[in-house]
Structures are given as C-alpha cells and as structure tokens.
Image (cartoon, grey):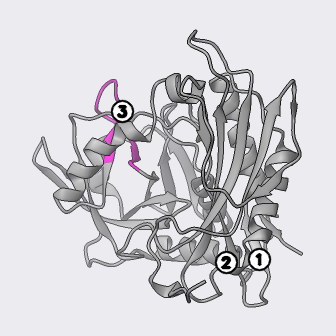
C-alpha cells in the first residue's frame, strides 16, 4: 500500500483490504464473513434495483491518543437500520449481526484507520439490499448485508468554517431510504439536482423547506439543521427528515452544558433571530452556517456576523469530537472500544 496522506483525504472511496457480508436465505442470516471482492453478483430483476428495497447506514471509527480504535454509537445505527427494514418490508437485520459485521470490517482493515490528530476517520458503510429476482411488486425473499470501510477526510472542504446555504423553493427533499426515515420512492438521488445547482452557485448545501406549505425548515441536503438562541438548541420536528444520530447526540450534549433543547416546527422567518446555526451529521459533525439565502424570495438571513463559528457550536463540536477520540470521558456509553 502506498503511503496515505492522512491530512489531505477527500470524503470519497478508497479501496481497503476486506468487506464483510451476511446473506439471508431460507429464513436465516449467515454468519458474517470477509471477502476481498469489491463486486456484487446481482440479478437484473433484484428487488433493490426495481422497487427500492435498499437501506444503508453511515458511521465512523476513530483512533485515540492511546492507539485504541473507537466506533461511535454503533448500536444506534443498527436500530435505525431495523426501522428502515420495517418501513420497506425487508427482513429485519438482527442487531448482533450488524455489530459483528461492523467490528469485523474495522478490525480486518485496521491499517486504514487514520492516526489521531490527522483530522481524518474511518467511514463505515453498512448496506442491506433485496437480492431475489422477481417482477411482481412484493418483498424479496433473499437479502445481502455487507459492510465496507474507507478512510475519509472532512465532508465539507471548508472544515469548521461557516459557509452559506441556499433555499431553493422549486425542490423538495425526498427522505432517504435506508436512514431511518422512510418515504417509499424517495432517496438521496432525488436531492442531487438541487444540491448540484446550489454548489454551482457557491453554496455548501440546500436548506429544504417542508414540502406541503413551504413555510418551515426541514433539513439540509446531507445533514440535519439546528439553530441557537436564548441559551436554547433548536432543531426541526418533522416526519420527513433524517433522524440524525449526530443531532441526537448534540441535543444530549447541549443539555449537559446547560442549554435548553427544543424540537419543534421552525418557520423560515425565525432564521433572522438565530445567534448560531449549523448542519449536523456523521460526516461533518457540525458545519456552521454563515448565512441562508432564499433565492426565489430574494431574502438573506445573516447568521454569523463575524464569519466565525459561534461559541455554542464550537463547544458542542469540540466536546463530541473529544468523546469520539477518547479525549473526554464517554459518560453516555456511546463508544465501542475495540480490543
């Protein structure tokens, strides 16, 4: 393996040594087993290709100063995948199979876990797909669960520097299959057009409004949204957004440091009152928002007056990162330390 420039990794795919797979057939799941193949042998009539029977998760592993590898909130991802299974009638993947496969994939690819202090991490992608061939619209009888890993840098190239986001009213955010919130027929592909348009205009992401009334904030394309004002952490309450594990963690940490937490509908006009705001997710943890531009209404909401991340965002970001890296005590038992 050529030497990896850990400090300059993109958020993309890099070949690693192994991935881990388990098959559901004849009413039972097989024990997770490793393979070096990057390919899947799949029938052209597989249900994942035609009827969207596919679910995925995303989580990370980190190396601490002590040299130990830590996986963040693996159990929450396993439970969220079960929720996805229920929503699109896939065979439920047992938590123990999920966790065994994730741990196995990380251990087999340990040399790809970036060193402490590099700013990089090992991204873990569990994937569950319907494999059996059929044309009728009904659930598959066979499934493949696999886990691959890849070392990654920050999702947002700007890092922890506030960036602008755009509201584009002509587009709706289709909730992703496979990330806990189920909207049959919706997936990340539905957000690509709006996301590419926003990037071409110089924005880091799209901030979507609710699909029904176009009045309330939903989420950003790749992440949940939060705002801070009056010593309160506020995040949208909506049935159509991703139930982010990172956001769930930040809400707990916000309470730990003395903030109130509110999950409620947020009208667009409330953006003018926020002292801080950000996008939150596995990839970036927190990406602070500089301003929000409503392109169609020709409105602009300035969030960061001085161009820097706010004190609450900074404190929450540093605290969560410290827990992930083992630099602070894991008082909520979120981390799995590999032996």
- Image coords of residue 43 (percent x, y): 59, 29
| Residue at position x 56%, y 12% in the image | 135
**Could you tell me which secondary element the residue under label 3 belongs to?**
loop
Image: magenta residue range: 207-221
- Image coords of residue 316 (percent x, y): 56, 71
Crowd class of label 3 (few under 14; some 14 to 19; many from 20; radius 10 Å): many
Say whether disc 3 or disc 1 marks the residue closer to the N-terminus: 1
Q: Which residue is mark 2?
A: 113
Reply above or below: 219 against 287.
above
Reply above or below: 267 against 312.
above
Q: CA distance from mark 3 to mark 1?
A: 39 Å
| Residue closer to the observer: 73 or 114 | 114
The C terminus appears in which quarter of the rendering?
bottom right
Q: Which residue is mark 1?
A: 69
- Left or right: residue 22 versus residue 117 is right
Whether pointer 2 and pointer 1 mark residues with C-beta atoms closer than 8 Å, the reply is: yes
Q: CA distance from mark 3 to mark 2?
A: 38 Å
- Image coords of residue 102 (percent x, y): 76, 57
Q: Which residue is mark 3?
A: 210
Question: Splitting the image into 4 quarters, where does residue 19 fall?
Answer: bottom right
Say whether disc 3 or disc 2 marks the residue closer to the N-terminus: 2
| Residue at position x 49%, y 71% in the image | 312
| Residue at position x 79%, y 44% in the image | 22
- Left or right: residue 90 versus residue 236 is right
- The circle drawn on residue 256 is none
**Mark 3 against mark 1, which lies toward the viewer?**
1
Whether pointer 3 and pointer 2 mark residues with C-beta atoms closer than 8 Å, the reply is: no
């Amino acid at each position: 393996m050529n030497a990896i420039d850990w400090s300059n990794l993109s958020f993309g795919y890099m070949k690693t040594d192994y991935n881990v797979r388990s098959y559901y057939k004849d009413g039972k799941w097989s024990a997770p087993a490793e393979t070096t193949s990057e390919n899947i042998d799949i029938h052209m009539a597989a249900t994942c290709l035609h009827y969207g029977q596919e679910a995925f998760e995303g989580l990370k592993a980190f190396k601490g100063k002590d040299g130990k590898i830590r996986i963040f909130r693996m159990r929450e991802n396993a439970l969220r995948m079960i929720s996805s299974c229920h929503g699109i009638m896939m065979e439920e993947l047992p938590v123990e199979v999920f966790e065994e496969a994730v741990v196995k994939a990380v251990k087999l690819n340990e040399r790809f876990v970036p060193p402490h202090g590099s700013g990089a991490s090992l991204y873990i992608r569990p994937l569950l797909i319907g494999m059996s061939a059929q044309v009728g619209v009904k659930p598959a009888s066979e499934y493949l669960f696999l886990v691959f890993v890849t070392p990654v840098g920050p999702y947002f190239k700007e890092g922890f520097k506030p960036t602008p986001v755009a509201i584009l009213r002509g587009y709706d955010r289709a909730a992703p299959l496979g990330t806990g919130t189920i909207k049959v027929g919706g997936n990340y592909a539905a957000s690509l057009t709006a996301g590419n348009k926003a990037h071409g205009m110089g924005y880091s992401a799209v901030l979507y409004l609710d699909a029904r009334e176009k009045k309330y904030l939903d989420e950003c394309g790749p992440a949940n949204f939060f705002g801070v004002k009056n010593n309160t952490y506020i995040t949208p309450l909506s049935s159509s957004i991703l139930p982010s594990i990172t956001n769930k963690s930040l809400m707990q940490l916000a309470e730990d440091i003395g903030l109130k937490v509110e999950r409620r509908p947020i009208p667009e006009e409330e953006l003018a009152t926020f002292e801080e705001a950000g996008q939150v997710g596995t990839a970036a943890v927190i990406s602070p928002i500089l301003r929000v531009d409503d392109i169609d209404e020709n409105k602009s909401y300035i969030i960061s007056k001085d161009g820097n991340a706010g004190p609450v965002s900074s404190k929450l970001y540093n605290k969560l990162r410290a827990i992930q890296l083992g630099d602070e005590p894991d008082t909520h038992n979120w981390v799995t330390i590999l032996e």
